Image (cartoon, helix red, strand yellow):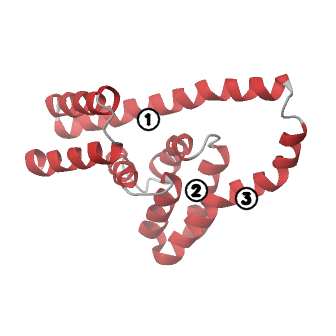
């Protein structure tokens, strides 16, 4: 039964997560934190941070980790397959249709309308992460890490890998 749950959690998040890995993260969070209660918000946020520090697509890294934590190596394989299965299915079915209607104003408007929905989902997830951080480490550390990350990423264009590693190092020194 656990393998079926791993499959459903990852399949649904990636089937409904139009826009790639970042769009599927809030959906996967809902599945593994709210629905199945395998992780807390804090644990999930740490998993996302660590996954972002590693090379490769975030969705497959999260699926592999969730699957491994819940069902061992077979669970990781099931999670990884469930993550790529929606893409395979939709690619085969929809590619021909999309190419046929790619100049249609309706198709162009559809892609414009999806972007705000993804932004809202990512915003809600960010608020959840900040709330969890505030409860876990306090307001001063949360504001410092959030502000420093924002400046490093947006103003000085530092790679997210270095920002995440710096935050991990900060946590190990000051919060460990």
Outermost residue, bottom side: 73
Q: Quadrant of residue 5?
A: bottom right
* Residue depicted at 68% across the width and 24% down the height: 112
Q: CA distance from mark 3 to mark 2?
A: 14 Å
Label 3 element class: helix
- Across and down, in percent, residue 163 comes to 27, 42
Residue assigned mark 3: 88
Given residues 10 and 118, the one toward you in this image is 118
Residues 97 and 140: in front is: 97
Relative image position of residue 101 (x, y in whole percent): 88, 35
Q: Nearer the viewer, mark 3 or mark 1?
A: 3
Q: Nearer the viewer, residue 21 or 123?
A: 21
Give the quarter of the image for residue 113: top right
Check disc 1 and report the residue beneath it.
125
Asked if the residue at tag 2 contacts the one at tag 1, i.e. Cβ–Cβ closer than 8 Å, the answer is no
Tag on residue 10?
2
Position of residue 171 measured from the top left corner of the image (x, y, whole percent): 16, 47
| Residue 36 to residue 150: above or below | below
Label 3 and label 1: CA atoms lie apart by: 27 Å
- Whether residue 108 sits left or right of residue 77 in the image: it is right
When asked about the image quadrant of residue 153, the answer is top left
């Amino acid at each position: 039964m656990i393998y079926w749950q791993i499959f459903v959690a990852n399949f649904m998040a990636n089937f409904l997560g139009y826009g790639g890995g970042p769009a599927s993260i809030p959906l996967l969070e809902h599945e593994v934190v709210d629905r199945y209660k395998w992780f807390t918000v804090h644990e999930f946020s740490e998993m996302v941070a660590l996954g972002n520090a590693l090379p490769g697509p975030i969705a497959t890294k999260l699926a592999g980790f969730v699957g491994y934590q819940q069902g061992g190596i077979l669970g990781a394989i099931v999670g990884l397959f469930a993550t790529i299965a929606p893409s395979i299915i939709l690619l085969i079915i929809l590619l021909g249709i999309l190419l046929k209607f790619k100049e249609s104003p309706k198709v162009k408007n559809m892609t414009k309308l999806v972007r705000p929905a993804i932004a809202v989902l990512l915003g809600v997830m960010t608020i959840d992460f900040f709330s969890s951080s505030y409860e876990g480490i306090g307001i001063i550390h949360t504001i410092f890490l959030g502000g420093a990350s924002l400046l490093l990423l947006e103003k000085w264009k530092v790679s997210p890998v270095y920002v995440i590693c710096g935050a991990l190092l900060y946590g190990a020194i000051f919060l460990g």
